[in-house]
Image (cartoon, helix red, strand yellow):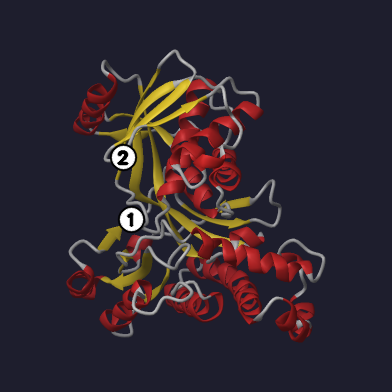
Amino acid sequence: MSNAVLKMSLTEKQVLDAGFAAVFGGESESYFSAPGRTEISGNHTDHQRGRVLAAAVNLDTRAAVRVNGTDRIRIQSKGYPMCEVSLSELTPVASEINSTPALVRGVAARFAQLGCEVKGFDAYCESTVLPGSGLSSSAAYEVLIGTIINHLFFDAKVSQPEVAMIGQYAENVFFGKPCGLMDQTASAVGGLVTIDFADKENPDIRPVKFDFSSTGHALCIIDSRADHADLTDEYAAIPGELKALCAHFGKEVTTEIDETEFYAAIPALRQKVGDRAVMRAIHEYNENRRVPKQVAALENGDFEAFLRLTKESGFSSWMYLQNVIPAGYKTEQAMAIALALCEKYLEGKGAYRVHGGGFAGTVQAFVPYEILDAFQAGIDAALGEGACHILSIRPEGGVPMEVEA
């Protein structure tokens, strides 16, 4: 059980209170926050029980909440339709696939399975984690709902890593997206963490002590301005193809297959599952070796080695994993444009890579402070004002909030 609390200003509280009162009337009782996340390395390795390096960022989804005495969860997110879920039905609903109610229902269902008596509540939410931004607005939302239920109805018995697993369950089983666990874990736990998913029931989560602000580089997330909301099939194809490849060896994930055995089987695999699946597996092996090297580089203070490995990760994602341009896209290649712009405006310095799920969303860049203004200006001129976000790493994961004294 964590005692972490996020401080908010009185003005921030008043904004949430006003939104809550306008929708539900009366006063809210409690406040919660869950951050977006940035994947530092380990692109699409989590669903193969591999390794990742990730961090919570200073953009979040937050809520003002009040228990409502009914069996219904009602959530009003600013700018979106009301989400309402009945707790009398806690099994997947076919018509809710790929929808927000599916996430809420899934989180509530998993808590109920764990013995929690989930009750109805009203919540008004505002978010700085833009949907489709590659910073995992969906994971922040799942972690937020899980954190609310955990604290209001379960005495915070569930650990933050377990809240992450509950969010993944909701997304996999109710929402219909076969995601890994990295996004939810980074959001739920907070800070900079490396995660080894070899034991899927008990992933090894280890904090990484490193101060990025000491490197002379800014962490930037570049919004490609392409929405990934309709690309679920592209994301699902990656674990789907790897699952078919692993079946050749009688295994579930690539981390269970000896790399030498994999390479020896490539002629048969090309015939059986196709070249793209083989290339994607090559990425998995390379990326899983790269993550521990990056962690070691940071812990040893070798930031130049970290940057070199970050570039390698980006090249591997584009060449082998192939999650930059959706299949068949010719005129629209927003992620590729964003990567090309990073290469130009970094002038051989820093590092850049495709970020998160890929195909749309965002690119990550580590930009030297001395060229940061020019880099941001160049990106914004090409992609639109505000495309380049300068972020910092947030220590807290999914937590209650209170007004700063």
Report x, y in % for residue 152.
Answer: 48, 22
The quadrant the N terminus occupies is top right
**Res. 65 image quadrant:** top left
Q: Examine the image and state in which quarter residue 277 appears.
A: bottom right
Where is mark 2, residue-wise? 80
**Mark 1, secondary structure of its residue:** loop
How many marks overall? 2
Q: Where is residue 74 in the image (x, y as percent from the top left)?
A: 40, 26
Which class describes the residues within 10 Å of circle 2: few (<14), some (14-19), or many (20+)? few
Point out residue 203 in the picture as x, y percentages from the top left corner.
65, 50
Give the image quarter of residue 238: bottom right
Residue drawn where x is 54% and y is 22% of the image? 118
The answer to whether 212 is drawn above or below residue 84 in the figure is below
In the rendered image, which quarter contains the C terminus? Answer: top left
Residue furthest front in the image: 95
Residue at 48 percent of width and 74 percent of height = 327
Residue for point 48% across, 47% down: 98
Disc 1 marks which residue?
392
- The amino acid type of the residue labelled 2 equals Tyr
Q: Which of 239 and 52 is in front in this view?
A: 239
Mark 1 nearby-residue class (10 Å; few <14, some 14–19, many ≥20): some
Residue nearest the observer in this picture, 54 or 87 = 87
SS state under label 2: loop
